Image (cartoon, grey):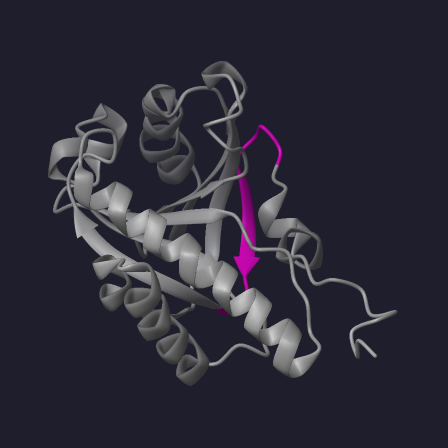
Amino acid sequence: MDSSAGRAKYDVKKAEREIYSPGRSFTLVEVPPQRFLAVDGHGNPNTSPDYAAAVQALYSVAYALKFAAKRSLGRDSVVAPLEGLWRAENPQVFAEGNKDSWDWTMLISQPEWINPEMAGETAAEVRTKKGLEAAARIRWLELREGLSVQVLHIGSYDDEAPLLARLHHEFMPENHLDFNGDHHEIYLSDPRRTAPERLKTVLRQPVRRK
């Protein structure tokens, strides 16, 4: 008998609704600690083969972990949306849309019953069975962002710059806030199935009070 029968399937978007369902206005939230599969890289995600390989490996490991946990632990979950941490020496490049100089860490949130050992073993299996060399780069990340500003962007990823400029040059100065972590994006839509003008993306910036 399936031990997960009658138990609700975990979905981080529902469990942490406040941080995955922001409105169209800037809002301050307290982000709880989270656990992620993570993979690092550099460059423009629109043109980098390394980015595509990293994301493919990340999803492959996330799905393999989901099914392994269902078999061995009787716990099921919805694979979380892709997220990204983006960094540069000067945060202004995000408002300018200059993507070639970006460093990134792509993420998929993990439920509490997944641990680093399971993640490492599964990544090694995916690398061997599917020949995805990028799976070797996947690591475990525990992220503590705390106080953050976030907003929902609807539209093309390339059209985020004006909204980020407002965040950096209006909302943060007006509310005496300073940068306190990487620019964070959560991709709620599948770009393969969604028109660019309808893409939904959470834009988040960890902050501290001045």
User: Does any portion of residue 146 appear in the rendered image?
Assistant: no
- Give the residue drawn at x 49%, y 65%: 64
Residue at point 33% right, 48% down? 55
Q: Is residue 85 left or right of residue 147?
A: left
Q: Quadrant of residue 16?
A: bottom right
- Reply yes or no: does residue 28 show up in magenta: yes
The magenta stretch is 23-34
Give the residue furthest to the right.
Answer: 6
Question: Is there any visible trace of residue 11 in the rendered image?
Answer: yes
Residue lying farthest to the front in this orientation? 129
Foreground residue, 129 or 120? 129
Q: Nearer the viewer, residue 23 or 46?
A: 46
Towards the viewer: 164 or 49: 49
Q: Quadrant of the N terminus?
A: bottom right
Left or right: 87 in relation to 14: left
Residue 34: x, y in percent?
50, 67
Give me the residue at 35% from left, 48% from top. 56
Q: In the displayed structure, would residue 189 be above or below residue 15?
A: above
Horizontal relation, residue 93 to residue 80: left or right: left
Q: Quadrant of the C terminus?
A: bottom left
Q: Is residue 135 magenta?
A: no
* Quadrant in the picture for residue 3: bottom right
Residue 86 location in percent, x, y? 27, 46
Q: Residue at x 32, y 56 (%)?
A: 180
Q: Where's residue 143, x and y in %?
A: 41, 67
In this view, 162 is above or below 91: above
